[in-house]
Amino acid sequence: MKIKITAAILLSMFFAVSCTDLDEQLYDRVEDGNFGNTTKEVDALVGGAYSSLRGFADGISNNYPTCEYVFFLNEVVSDEATIPTRGTNWYDGGQYQDAQKHTWKADNRMILSAWRYNYTGIAKINAIIYQVNKSSLSDKAKEPIFAELKALRAYYYYNLLDLFGNVPIVTNFEDTDLPSNSTRKQVYDFVEKELTDAIPHLNPNVVYSKLTRNVAYSILARLYLNSEAFIGVARWQDCLDACQKVTGYSLTPDFFANFITENQTSPEIIFAIPYDSKAGTVGNYMNSMSAHYNQKLAISAIPNNYPWSANGMCAQPGVYSAFADTDKRKKCMLEGDQINLATGSVIIMDNGEPLTYTENLTSLEDAKENEGVRLAKYEMKAGEQWERDHDFVLIRYSEILMMQAECYVRLGSPDLARPFVQQVTARAGEEMPTTIDLAFIDQELLKEFTFEGRRRTDNIRFGTFFLPWWSKGATEKYRAIFPIPSTVLTTNKNLKQNPGYPN
């Protein structure tokens, strides 16, 4: 038997138009109490919660976290990356230009995708919590399961807090009422409480790709690091305290070992989304979103031994040159001549010109095919298919080190920041400055976490988000959060648009 739950609340949040396959995407059918009563069944249920991290795509929006919408949203509105229009390609209604110029509107599809990605994950977790609650497991047996699920749900709500601020908090799968906004402070408090309540019941050990105590403390540290930006209350010491409770990790000597195909062996990765194309995972094609269409010729001398690339996202001018030539991390970007491995000569583009990536971009509205240095952080190798097998990294131990360094600087003790920063810079082959200040921390964050989807948040925390940069003027303060998507507001009249944006 299955219990049908009214999907009004789910429809109001995720769908702008009708969809005939609600059960698959909305997870609005759950098994009754006859399922979820054994360890194997419970593991299968909880595994479903983790699979939601890989996102989905449908006729409404593309919601894979590594796609040109969800992942790139935080990148292309930052000072790090851009998606320029190249001839007739990558215009798509001007949504990428609007992102770069900070003139986005509530109908931008990138914003809708970020909303749906996070709320669909929340909806699935709520359904699983409901199912576990209906099972015959004892309350004691349910407790660690609920803690893990609620901590994972808090991760999604942290994302929404960061992106949208004043969002609905929905935790009851059986609640069919259309939700209204919670304030950003209420969402902040909810995330904090969910994590702190869960932590005592979470696994204290290092367990790859699971929401453990270490992962919860890492998310909590992020919350406290950005507390002043989120709610106007600085909590630097609380961030330090949370970071110091993350144990069992170390920097891998080779920076790029975090991004190879078999990166699950890295001692640095705290949380990641696992991918295995042979097991049927989909959506992990970020490497093909940046490089030129003919980049495959520089990866393999064998024809059709590497997938097509879309020639999209690239670094903004000034990012590549921010790295010293001795900085090992500079190789996270492709620059200069791209060599055809079959001929040994520079690849020739269809227009007859050499494929030579340049840091300069002629313009946002009409960039040349070869302009802009390209993403090359994750391994690219011959024989790969469109769906890659590297795990997508969400949290690394170097972030824990850099959060502590930043907090010590902000608390007026830069000397205490030195040993944390030194671990990161030593691995990169970069010399430490005489003085560690916020300007240095900001630049080090740019170089350490290039193309890892976090730069917008750093820009806002450091205040640079609101300053002019390449192809962007000054940004209004209200754009520190995105508008609630217009289709969501149309479907749910109980929601109010974020301040500054038209209703």
Image: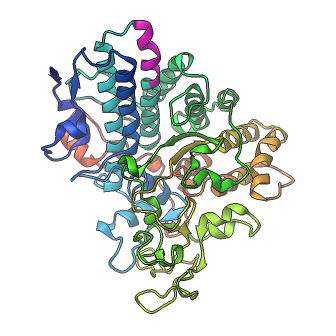
Figure quadrant of residue 243: top right
Q: Is residue 238 above or below residue 292?
A: above
Q: What percent of the width, then of the height, locates residue 203? A: 56, 22
Q: Is residue 151 above or below residue 467?
A: above
| Residue 296 visible in rendering | yes
Specify the color scheme: rainbow
| Quadrant of the frame with the N terminus | top left
Q: Residue furthest bottom?
A: 352
Q: What percent of the width, then of the height, locates residue 330? A: 67, 65
Q: Is residue 269 above or below residue 309?
A: above
Q: Residue furthest right?
A: 434
Q: Please report the bounds of the magenta region as a residue range.
A: 139-148
Q: Residue at x 24, y 36 (%)?
A: 26
The mark tally for this picture is 0
Q: What percent of the width, then of the height, locates residue 262? A: 56, 50
| Residue 501 visible in rendering | no
Q: Nearer the viewer, residue 348 or 299?
A: 299
Q: Nearer the viewer, residue 18 or 143?
A: 143
Q: Is residue 40 above or below residue 255?
A: above
Figure quadrant of residue 337: bottom right
Q: What percent of the width, then of the height, locates residue 107? A: 28, 54
Q: Main secondary structure of the magenta part?
A: helix
Q: Residue at x 31, y 55 (%)?
A: 109
Figure quadrant of residue 320: bottom right
Q: Nearer the viewer, residue 183 or 399?
A: 399
Left/right of residue 134 with respect to residue 400 in the rendered view = left
